[in-house]
Image: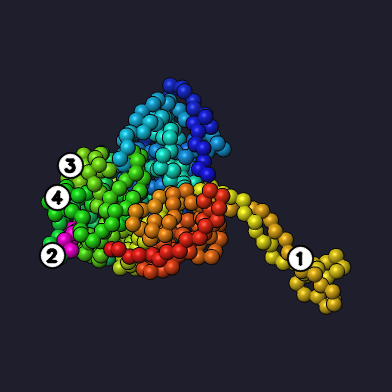
Amino acid sequence: MKKNITVLAILICLISSSSVFSQSGFRFFDPNQKKTRVKFKLINNLIIIPLEINNRKLNFILDTGVNKTILFNLSDRDSLQLKNVRRVNLQGLGTGDSVESLLSRNNTFVLNNLISYNESIHLVINDKFDLSAKMGITINGIIGYRLLKDLIVKIDYNKKYLTFFNPKNNSIPKCKNCEEFRIELIKNKPYMYVDAQIDTIGTKKTKVKLLIDSGGSDAFWLFEHTKENIVTPNKHFKDILGEGLSGTIYGNRSRIPKVSIGSYEIEEPTVSFLDTISTKMARQVQGRNGSLGGNILKRFRIWIDYPNKRIILKKTGSLKGGFNYNMSGLDIIHNGRRLVKIKEPPRINTGYGRSSQTSGNTSLSILTTYRYKFRPSYIINNVLENSPGGEAGLKVGDVILSINRKHAHTFKLSNINKILQSYNNRKIVLVVERDGKKMEFKFRLRKII
């Protein structure tokens, strides 16, 4: 059951007074401090950080693809004071219309030893794309440019640490076997050029201009027809690529032979080719051909330096790793929590009022007890046509009870996604609840690209 997101839980302070602090942008509490480290969680190739807003600690995605700080998914338990509020509309990727939001100014952000005053927040009133359900943990918002604009950040995907450097007091350490690339900031978003071999027959490479998008979990997105030879290869399948502020993002999922980022060569990455409807707003950036996402970025150790308009990459052992995708055709999301019956470990009673694992008495009794506990619940959010899951008869709204004979509540959502991306022809057995009835479905994962 999806959370009921309500603005009534938010205490909005409608005042026009401005903060006594005039500076804008993140800086160190101690101006002499050289660097600070922040631990993050990595889920679906996305970076989740603990950002504090007006003394309330929340989970935010670090998204280089956004130039505004966006807040959503506040539950009934959340209370957040927002200042200087007015209504505005936001437009993003997706097929729908713009979304209504509340713009709040003069907020205070804190991240470890970093602080910023006078920060603006866009609060999305209707959380249509519900990232928390798709990630399996509560996600309250996304932040990008506002955090990065005045600092240098090192992203270590393997150790799951961000290191922020003070550009005034410390230059980043010299990096062996690294490559530096210039970035172009357009509307406060970073872009770089890479070479992509799109034609599956020839060897010609096309120079493409891509948004560096740490908020995208895919490897690459390419926009069809922005250049003459950017068209979907013959071998592909139609897929739902994600959700944007303006609705569902559709496209064709395929593979291309190679992408080159400087001297780094990435073999046979998966690429999503997007249609013109879903990318109408993104195509307004002159020369943009697509995005470079988290499934590529996580294969490097990265330094992002907005003040000097550069990005530095150092490959890790995962650069040569393969690119998997969901081969079931099922989009499974978190569905809140459900009450389940849990069997407790058995106890051995000696007959003298004591419980032990071993006993010398001739009379023993084994006590089996059960408890009811709330555990994660999962539901099918979408079913692709002509997919293994769809052909088996699974439907949107089916609640997952077990996966391959194991209770669904014992899995994390990331583990379920790994199973559905594992290997071709793997047998999947799902037991679901539909209209109060238990039903079993069997199918095999099918590799298409």
Label whose residue precedes the other's in the sequence (2 or 3): 2
Q: What secondary structure is marked by label 1?
A: strand
Label whose residue precedes the other's in the sequence (4 or 2): 2
Mark 1 nearby-residue class (10 Å; few <14, some 14–19, many ≥20): few
Foreground mark, 3 or 4, reads: 4
From the image, tell me which residue sits under label 2.
202
Q: Which stretch did the figure color magenta? A: 195-200
Spatial CA distance of label 4 from label 2 is 17 Å
Mark 4 nearby-residue class (10 Å; few <14, some 14–19, many ≥20): some
Rendered image: mark on residue 227 = 4
Spatial CA distance of label 3 from label 4 is 12 Å
Q: Residue at x 38, y 42 (%)?
A: 143
> How far across and how far down the image is residue 362, in percent?
85, 77
Location of the C terminus (image quadrant): bottom left
Label whose residue precedes the other's in the sequence (3 or 4): 4
Q: Residue at x 18, y 59 (%)?
A: 198
Q: What secondary structure is marked by label 3?
A: loop
Spatial CA distance of label 2 from label 3 is 27 Å
Which amino acid type corresponds to the residue marked 2 in the rendered image? Gly
Label whose residue precedes the other's in the sequence (2 or 1): 2
Q: Residue at x 43, y 46 (%)?
A: 131
The reply to whether dot 4 and dot 2 touch (C-beta < 8 Å) is: no
From the image, tell me which residue sits under label 1.
367
